[in-house]
Amino acid sequence: MNLMSYMRCPPSPWAVRPITEKISLYEAPTSLRTEMANNEHLIRHMYDHFNARDIDGVLSKLSENVEWANGMEGTHIHGQDAVREYWTYQWSVIDPHVEPKIISEAEDGSVVVSVHQTVHDLEGKLLLDEAIEHVFRIKDGLVTRFDIQGNSQLSTVSH
């Protein structure tokens, strides 16, 4: 490309810029957003809605046939209706709060979330305070599977 054609065709916004000039994140085209950033947003959205007891807000981020860990019984449940039933029951007997601390991606593509989980009884008495990991499988922007990794004590809490 000669200098004259370069002047008629402005350089790409992604061309090398002087080190003193900052590039705004908002200049990045949508196609450059990483899958991990989208997954992190999805995960944080889910925890916010879970802690607010907004079942529909969380279910909107789950696949219809999601496989979900039932931490109270140490099993898995299947489907959005089963997740709704599980949480409706759970929230009628305990008051859990789960705060994501670190969100990372495992080599197999799953999203691993280190969380701080506290559980109170309905009168406010602390029953459980633990750090564990939650593992999510995400496909097409929806959670397809959720597992609890580590030794959660949730199943030992009387309910």
Image (spheres, rainbow, N blue to C red):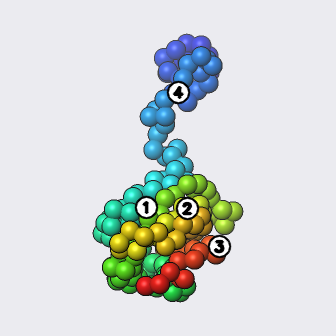
Of label 2 and label 1, which has the lower sequence position? 1
Q: CA distance from mark 2 to mark 3?
A: 11 Å
- Please identify, in this view, whether the residue under mark 2 or under mark 4 is nearer the observer: 2
Residue 115's disc is 2
- In this rendered view, identify the residue nearer to me: 151 or 124: 124
Task: Residue 129 in the image: state x and y as whole percent.
Answer: 54, 66
Residue assigned mark 4: 23
Task: Residue 105 in the image: state x and y as whole percent.
Answer: 62, 59
Q: CA distance from mark 1 to mark 4?
A: 31 Å
Of label 2 and label 3, which has the lower sequence position? 2
Of label 2 and label 4, which has the lower sequence position? 4
Q: Secondary structure at mark 4?
A: loop
Q: CA distance from mark 3 to mark 1?
A: 19 Å
Callout 2 touching callout 3 (CB < 8 Å): no
Task: Quadrant for residue 15, please give it.
Answer: top right
Does residue 33 show up?
yes
Residue assigned mark 1: 47
Q: Left or right: where does residue 93 sit relative to residue 10? A: left
Callout 4 touching callout 3 (CB < 8 Å): no
- In this rendered view, identify the residue nearer to me: 118 or 113: 118
Label 2 environment density (alpha carbons within 10 Å; few <14, some 14–19, many ≥20): some
Q: CA distance from mark 4 to mark 3?
A: 41 Å
Task: Quadrant for residue 108, please give it.
Answer: bottom right
Q: CA distance from mark 2 to mark 1?
A: 10 Å
Callout 2 touching callout 1 (CB < 8 Å): yes
Which residue corresponds to the image point at 47% horizontal and 63% vertical from the top-left?
Answer: 98
Residue assigned mark 3: 150
Q: Secondary structure at mark 1?
A: helix
**Image quadrant in which the N terminus is located:** top right
Does residue 64 show up?
no
Q: Name which residue type carries label 4.
A: Ile
Q: Name which residue type carries label 2.
A: Val
